[in-house]
Image (cartoon, grey):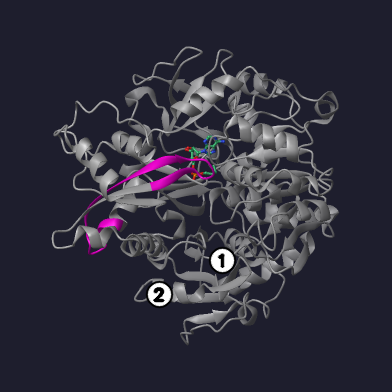
Amino acid sequence: MGDEVLANLKHESQVFPPDEEFAAQANATAALYDEAEADRDGFWAAQAERLHWETKWSRVLDWSDAPFAKWFVGGRLNVAYNCVDRHVEDGHGDQVAIHWVGEPGDTRDITYAELKDDVSRAANALASLGLSAGDRVAVQLPMIPEAIVSMLACARLGLVHSVVFGGFSPAALRSRVEDAAARVVITSDGQYRRGKAAPMKANVDEALAGAETVEHVVVVRRAGIETPWTEGRDLWWHELVDAQSAEHTPEAFDSEHPLFILYTSGTTGRPKGILHTSGGYLTQVAYTHDVVFDHKPGQDVYWCTADIGWVTGHSYIVYGPLANRATQVVYEGTPNTPDEGRHWEIVQSKKVSIYYTAPTLIRTFMKWGDQIPASYDLSSLRVLGSVGEPINPEAWLWYRENIGAGRLPVVDTWWQTETGGIMISPLPGVTAAKPGSAQRALPGIGAKVVDQTGAEVPHGSGGYLVLDKPWPGMLRGIWGDEERYRDTYWSRFGDLGFYFAGDGAKYDDDGDVWLLGRVDDVMNVSGHRISTTEVESALVSHPTVAEAAVVGASDPTTGQGIVAFVILRGGVAEGEARGEEAIGALRDHVAKEIGPIAKPRQIMVVPELPKTRSGKIMRRLLRDVAENREVGDVTTLADSSVMDLISSGLKGGG
Ligand code: WT7
């Protein structure tokens, strides 16, 4: 992190004022900051007017039971109606909602009118299974239209969806299905990955063996591969859904009715089910999608490259863009299938105007070479976005130069699964952009950088990022664990009432915010959150491993890479377990336990782990080893010779 901070400082002087022509047509104005500051509740009330409310709220915010918020108290709405039906009723039924691009090259264009029929049929199908408002539905699907339709069908019925990333292991799916007591799971026979159809349903079956709450598994046929089947439980989507009526009357639900649960890694081994509700969440994602991306319905072609298995897909593929009547690209596959120009070919052919992606992918594009985007017509683009981890100034500048023709606004958007929507970001047309900085809390949002005592740090210094005002899209808790919600997010600064984000940050001399990465035991690999403890538990569940410590070491492409240090069990010969094969088997074991995204980049066999006298593993020292740095201060170690032992062992044994 130290080098990164220095690199940031080097670039800090560079500022790109907004283009005048862009500013003249921008959705956002500088006045928004003052309006929100003068009357925060009034500001959010105005944003909520973007939606259709069946019954209007009587009060904007009830924070009397903090940290449990109620937004738009007494209001009633249907989220799916807001994302689909009202656009059809307003005469935009023929507008394309989704330009879907399959990895093998098949495509589907779905208009808002068609989407309304699809969602209605799926809602009728789910209702026919006996599901009713409040029930949980788990969804593990590739990036196909049915994924979006499933989520909206749940929203339409007041069902709570829990989308599980397609790359997660059966064990990870299992724990999520059990935690939420899902009654139905929606999946597909298989998914395309780099030109090959990989099974998905077979993994779901493995996950569900003995899962008592699951009554039905609905299976979308995507890959046409042979699929194991449990009679009575399993149902084909095309048989169940296609036969349904396209008429379905949406019911309005309370503003605080649960919309979804999304699991994310914390500092302990057990993922947290982050709970989001309806009215406030939809208000924030619609507002931010409008002002941060300068989205113009009916004109722009928007593309967010995330997967719906992550919050970015929930908020900026499904709910925000559809609430704002976007026409968007949804792409199923990997960015290098069939070749490394795939994204730019799609931008060119679909005339994408807003493109939102992650720093890890931008750095991958840099590695693939400038000549690749240069050989496509990218002139339709007008706004570029970034999310998932701090974007290094080099990548930011490359993005603007090579994808943005050296002139497009780049918005670096900071937020989290827990925040529901974007919190800190430049506003295109308003903000003078600084490469590498997320800059300033959006109008209506309160963020601060504070020291350990909660006092705001002066400009030019660093500390912890906190959110000091409730916001409409905020999580409403951790599913089934009120205490963990209070402890994790609200206890760090005592009575100050700050939400602790888990990120380090600093102010520059102008007071702009620079994010500096996580300050807890959470790693960020390619924009995915993985806890060190989770990987450690996976490792020690292997018969050869006695103890494990995991750190995130900086990685030029993925941001961080997972590096594991393991102590072997007595009886396992060291030479043997150090062998490539044994290490490979351990890496595969982690992939099997959690998912391929959690596979360690490197595993080192060591005789001891550095621990403090109270037994806490000093990851800082292991990070020094993993990043090939001189090992730092060892004076708080219980046994200060341990680091020598580790270092010399690694030199000798590889
Ligand atoms: C963590 C949240 C938000 C959707 C994707 C990740 C890091 C995210 C940025 C950014 C610096 C960022 C933070 C945050 N992060 N965006 N623009 N600049 N850091 O969601 O999995 O909940 O992870 O991602 O560390 O806490 P998530």
Quarter of the image for residue 443 reads top right
Q: How many numbered circles are shown? A: 2
* Residue hosting label 2: 206
Residue 141: mark in rendering: 1
Residue at (55% x, 84% y) in the render: 226
Q: Is residue 163 above or below residue 472?
A: below
Q: Is there any visible trace of residue 463 in the rendered image?
A: yes
Please give left or right for residue 325 compared with residue 282 in the image: right
* Segment tinted magenta in the rendering: 539-562
Q: Can you give x and y, in whole percent of width and height, for residue 608 in the image?
A: 19, 45
For badge 2, the amino acid type reads Glu
Q: Is residue 21 above or below residue 201?
A: above
Please identify the residue farthest to the bottom as the structure is shown.
231
Front residue of this view, candidates 474 and 201: 201
Residue at (40% x, 27% y) in the render: 497
Provide the secondary structure element on which disc 2 rests: helix
Q: Can you give x and y, in whole percent of width and height, for residue 173 in the image?
A: 42, 64
For residue 556: magenta? yes
Q: Is there any visible trace of residue 476 in the rendered image?
A: no
Q: Residues within 10 Å of mark 1 (few under 14, many from 20)?
A: many
Magenta residues, dominant SS class = strand
Please give left or right for residue 427 compared with residue 504 in the image: right
Residue at (78% x, 51% y) in the render: 347
Q: Residues within 10 Å of mark 2 (few under 14, many from 20)?
A: some
Residue at (50% x, 14% y) in the render: 460
Provide the secondary structure element on which disc 1 rests: loop
For badge 1, the amino acid type reads Leu
